[in-house]
Amino acid sequence: MAKLQFNLECPNCHRKFRQKVEEMRPGKSRHCPYCGTVIEFTGDDGRQIQEAVDDLERSLKRASRTTIIKL
């Protein structure tokens, strides 16, 4: 199974770079590869992303159940 990644925006320079969700644990940090700003992860970071992924999965399941094809 592929590791879930997303584009993380640096709060300082606003450039985006790839970040693995599994590495966003409370107390961990990451340096922006462009400006060097240290981005610290809190307990909410991973939880918020997981909630968004769960919402997307539920939406996709609902969409697949309600799709009607007329021929």
Image (spheres, helix red, strand yellow):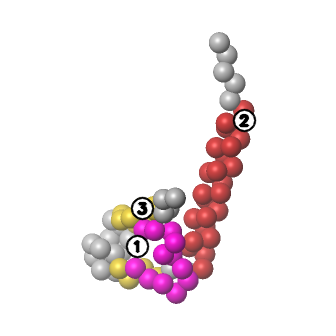
**Residue lying at the far left of the rendered structure:** 34
Circles 2 and 1, Cβ within 8 Å, touching? The answer is no
Which numbered circle lies on residue 65? 2
Q: Which residue is mark 3?
A: 7
The magenta-colored residue range is 19-30
Q: Amino acid at mark 2?
A: Arg
Disc 2 and disc 3: Cα gap in Å?
30 Å
Disc nearest the viewer among 3 and 1: 3
Where is 19 relative to 66, above or below? Answer: below
Q: Which mark is residue 11?
A: 1
Residue 7 x/y as whole percent = 42, 61
Q: Total of numbered circles in the picture?
A: 3
- What is the spatial separation of the Cα atoms under label 3 and label 1, in whole angstroms? 13 Å
Residue 23 magenta-highlighted: yes
Residue 17 location, quadrant: bottom left
Figure quadrant of residue 66: top right
- Does residue 58 appear to the left or right of 12 in the view shown? right
- The amino acid marked with disc number 3 is Asn
Is label 3 in a helix, a strand or a loop? strand
- Residue 16 at what x, y percent from top left? 36, 63
Amino acid type for the residue under numbered disc 1:
Pro
Reading the chain from its start, which is encountered first: label 2 or label 3?
Answer: 3
Task: Check the image and name the residue furthest to the bottom.
Answer: 27
Q: In the rendered view, does 7 fall on the left or right side of 69?
A: left
